Image (tube, rainbow, N blue to C red):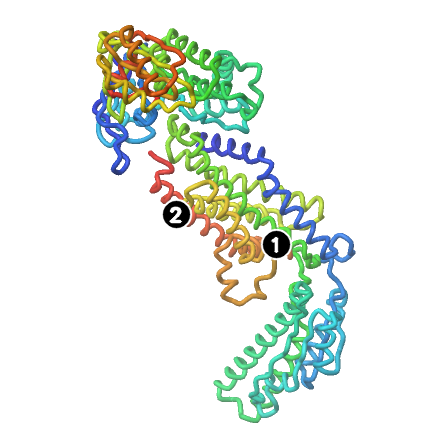
Amino acid sequence: MAPILEVRDLVKKYDDFTAVNGISFSVDEGEIFSLLGPNGAGKTTTISVISTLFPPTSGDASVCGHSVTKDPMAVKRCIGVVPQELALYEDLTALENLHFWGQMYGLSGKPLADRIAEVLEQIGLADKAKQRIKTYSGGMKRRVNIGIGLLHKPKLLFMDEPTVGIDPQSRRAILDSVKELNRQGMSILYTTHYMEEAQELSDRVGIIDHGELIALGTQEELTRQVNETDTLVLHIAENEDPQPLVNRLQTLDGVSRASVIDHEISIITRSAQELIAPAVQTAEAVGIKIYSVDIREPNLEAVFLHLTGRALRD
Amino acid sequence: MKKLFIIALKDMKLIFRDPTALIMMLLAPFLITLGMGLITGRFSANTNSGISNIPVAIVNQDEGELGKALEAVFSSDELADLLEPTFAATPAEARQLVEADQASAAIIIPQGFSASIIPDERGSTSGETVQISFIANSNSPTYSGILRSILDAFLTQVEVGRIGAEVTLSQVAQTGKLTPELAAQLGAVLGTQFGQQSAQAQPIQLENTTASGAAVKFDLLMYFAPGMALMFLMFTVSNGGRTLLLENRTGTLPRMMQTPTTSAQILGGKLLGIFLTAIAQLAILIGSTTLLFRLDWGEPLGVILLILAAAFAASGWGSFIATFSKTPAQVANLGSVIMLFFGLLGGSFFDMSQLPEWVSTLGKITPNAWGLQGFTTLAGGGTLRNISEPLLALLIMGIILFALASIWMRRRGLVRK
């Protein structure tokens, strides 16, 4: 299938800081492609450049066959963007917001009114369309934010961390709507730092860190890199300092890497089963109580940990 | 062009839904104008100006024509309702009346005043510098300002007459047909004549006529209403500039740039929004004061053109302020400072002619000064021709400021390609 998006050696620098450092990837028509990486990895900058918001420092990207540097207006007509920030007018109603943004995409009259009605149904806000955005919950605002990106039925939709800061139900609804849009034929470039979202949604995943694409492929291809390893997860109390335990665990035989997020210590090891006893003993030795232990199958989190030595949410 | 209006109308809708903005744009200028009307008795007096019987103490120590003429001006029938002159015998007595708040000002015409200006039978003046003293009552700034204006108008007439007489004499002398004796006689006759003319001349634009010849009385509210409207217009335009930075911060401006819309359309739409909001604000204020205070703003076409020009120039300032600010809060703060500064400098609070000349010259950078000049001219019966200067000045001001703002916005990357 022909790529609807092709990114070639894209570089974006801000003075001395390199936000995106020569990344290349493509998104095929009808595909959901996820850019997975921690905050500050360069995901938003990448989307900003390929959606023509900023010019690249070097390199180029082709969207629907149009270069973002040479024909940005044609690119804009082909794409829809759901930004990470809630780019809405709080003092306007959802209906007024959709009407304004629809006009900005060149829609008007009955086609616009019909399309607004469809989108409102799609995002489940038809009955609250005449309420001002400032009266909405965070999840409802997120849904309007997505709805705006769908108004003109774009061929390629950029969704930049669309589930940040919302409740589980709204998150579920958004993930389901992404899958539904894809079923309808829309190609989607999705960025996230949630491994579970990338795993659930994506046909292919690009793992990005410090502005560089460090891995690219289907989930199978990526997890194959860590197939010989398990992830052992230790849950400790909130008031404990995990660092002494992490330092000691890294010295144990069979431990590739150990990292901590909040109060969850992840250990990459050849055999999680065999490591449970020595890990618990080590914890006792440093005076840290372990509340529970998980063994996880190889996943994208493990891939990221394996490749960078850090957890995704570090 | 369509997208410009889409963006502009969206901005207007947002501003007119913002209660704080509405208070500053409409309620505050309206209430202050109302307050000024109440303070000056505009709503209780039967006179159109709301001002009457301004007490003034006059001491005439001059024995010539000009002293009599000035005395006649202050006790003329035309100003009988406005002024209540008291003729004191000595400067000390007049000063005492001011200090006791029984006079808003004292005018002392010194001995030899006429002789210092009008040539005698020999065709020469006394050569002394004799000045009229004006003692203002600091407790009565508005009234003393009006009295000062009347005196200034009289002195201007005197100066015009003196120069006219000199020119006449000089031209006749150049023909060689004027003997020294005749020149002296002619000088004395001209001097006497212009002294009398000064007394007969209308001393100030307190009473004027419209194009149709109908009498129009000076209405103090016709000074404060446009003054306040123009001052709070600066709030509106700086608030408009603020929304540009605010939209950049909240992500709606970048989102607009990701739609098939050029940066010129986005910038144009934002600026058009500021301009249209400014027009709406002025139109609402003028409309409401016309209906509620029964103000006569003058020739409708002139008023409309002046609204457009003032809104255009002020919008230029609003855009310009936004280009030099980094955050929306900075625009708001800078806008408030400029609103007050321009209000003071542009004459929204008091007549700039009472301040040093350099201050009123500096005031010309403000849309307030030009707008006020135009609106008071129209209210005083002026026609479209009389406001061509403020109209042109406001137009040029707007063009320069919008051009500078556009260049700087692009340079700052606020609006990208």
Q: Earlier in the sequence, mark 2 or mark 1?
A: 1
Secondary structure beneath dot 1 equals helix
Question: Residue A44 sits in which quadrant?
Answer: top left
Name the amino acid, label 1. Leu
- Does residue A300 lie above or below B197 as drawn? above
Q: Residue at the spot x=73%, y=54% of the render?
A: B42
**The disc numbered 1 marks a residue on which chain?**
B
Secondary structure beneath dot 2 equals helix
Q: Residue at the spot x=53%, y=89% of the render?
A: B178
Foreground of the two, B377 or B90:
B90
Of badges 2 and 1, the one in the foreground is 2
Q: Position of residue B90 (x, y in %)?
A: 72, 83
- Spatial separation of the CA atoms under disc 2 and disc 1: 31 Å
The circle drawn on residue B404 is: 2
Foreground of the two, A286 or B204:
A286
Q: Quadrant of the C terminus of chain B?
A: top left
The circle drawn on residue B378 is: 1
**The disc numbered 2 marks a residue on which chain?**
B
Q: Quadrant of the N terminus of chain B?
A: top left
In the displayed structure image, the side of residue A283 where residue B188 appears, left or right: right
Question: Residue B64 sits in which quadrant?
Answer: bottom right
**Count of numbered tags:** 2
The circle drawn on residue A18 is: none
Q: Residues within 10 Å of mark 1 (few under 14, many from 20)?
A: many
Q: Residues within 10 Å of mark 2 (few under 14, many from 20)?
A: some
Name the amino acid, label 2. Leu
